[in-house]
Amino acid sequence: MTRLTYLPGDSFFHRMDPTVKLAWNFLAAALVASHLDPLYGALWFGYAFGLAVCLARLPLRRYLRLVAVFAAFGLSLGLWQAVYNPGGSPALWAWGPVHVTLKGLSTGVAILFRVLALTSLAAVFTLTTEPARLMESLIQVARLPYRLAYTVYAGLRFMPLFQDEAQIISNAHQVRGVSDADTGLFARLRLNASLVVPLLVSGIRRARAAAIAMDSRAFGAYDRRTVLHPQRLRRRDLAFLLGHVVLAAALFYYFVILGQGRLFIG
Amino acid sequence: MTTQNRRMFSTTDLMLMAVIAVVGSLLAVFVFNPLILVPFPVFLFLGPISWVGLSGLFLITPVLIGLLIQRPGVATVYGLVQGLLEMLFGNPSGPLSILYAGLEGLGVDLSLALFRWRANLPGALLAGAVGNLIVIVVYIPVFGLASAANFIVGGIVAVISGALLGGLPAWLIAQALHRTGVTAGLGRKPYEEIK
């Protein structure tokens, strides 16, 4: 399975401050969603692809595998849309109540490219952002309260413990005669569902113990903390973000103020 | 601990959020996301928004945390934490998952506020319904599926799905946890047990 998690590297995007990168990603996603058109969507997908390969230096094979997974989702959305909302134009193909029109197909292709562009932008962010550095940046640059950021840190620390705990509970179930031999989807779901409450019980106990340990070390006693790795905003990061702000303003003027945008299918 | 008293959440609350957020993120990324893409025949009438049918599953953990901690804003803050974790665990929505999870939490908080954050079944059902409705109303235009029909049908299905697949399981899990005694000392008000 192709995982969408951090890949170490030394590209422009790897070095970019994560808060700036986050702001850029939200802005770019808003721009992608601001107009529904096949060419517009294709241009954004091409742009995101270019960034992924040139500025983020993501391994092409891994990137394409990720995009292929989500292309299936985009394709299904696009096909459904083409069939369900054919629009008023003459049918290119008809079979019973199903009518495929040029307008419906155009909308379907636009949706496919929109999904691909959004997924590519997400991949550029997630594959180039180290979780610890993201949290450091959110605390220092975005001024996120550090107690909240540490909650996310704690979550990352809890994850491997949960995997061990799930295995222990699963073993205990097997000792009591619950078998995992049945590999059917519903049998698997039933088996996993039986893990939820015991896992949460042990998780809550662990959370209480962690909280006592943290409080006893005066966690949260001060509003600010000293930092080990100071995060600084670089001019090139800000320039990259500023370029997108200018682009956003221009596209907002064209699509919203001048009314050229097509957000809704109607 | 000079500033402890004016804080909204204790360290225990925050660690509890972390624990539930890990479960919620793993479920969202590795179970619910692939599951809602399966074109279940029962939801085929929804066409391009057939994924709304199972979307209520995402509301289980935000409602659960609201029922456990019972404080204003807990589900919204939890949503932001879960969104960040989902993004780091590989949610294909990337940073947008922070927005979606935050909105889910906001919907849950608004609903629980009507019940003064008391943990009861109607509150849990409403929280699941409203949380899901808010996020679906945002999701539909982002995927380019905005139309009056999609908003109306999708909205109705989102409310039902959120209540039955999100609010109800969260309530049942909260009850199961309560019976084990592990929730003693959490939250502010006693649980109203199902008779």
Image: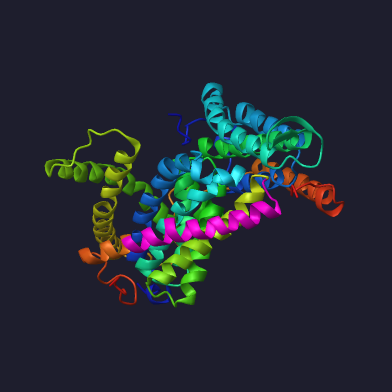
Looking at the image, residue A90 sits to the left or right of residue A1; the answer is right
Looking at the image, residue B195 sits to the left or right of residue A81; the answer is left
State the predominant SS element of the stretch in magenta: helix
Q: Quadrant of residue B10?
A: bottom left
The residue at the far front in this view is: A96
Count of numbered marks: 0
Give the answer, above or below, for where B165 lies relative to A54. below
User: In the image, which residues are magenta?
Assistant: B145-172
Q: Quadrant of residue A63?
A: top right
Q: Residue at x 34, y 76 (%)?
A: B188
| Relative image position of residue A14 (x, y in whole percent) | 55, 36
Give the answer, above or below, for where B9 lies relative to A75. below
Residue A44 visible in image: no
| Relative image position of residue A47 (x, y in whole percent) | 69, 32
Q: Quadrant of the N terminus of chain A?
A: top left
Does the magenta run of residues contain A266?
A: no
| Relative image position of residue A51 (x, y in whole percent) | 64, 31
Pick whichever, B35 or A26, lies toward us.
Answer: B35
Pick whichever, B85 or B153, lies toward us.
Answer: B153
Does the magenta run of residues contain B159?
A: yes
Pick whichever, A227 or B36, lies toward us.
Answer: B36
Pick whichever, A161 or A135, lies toward us.
Answer: A161
Give the answer, above or below, for where B162 lies relative to A171. below
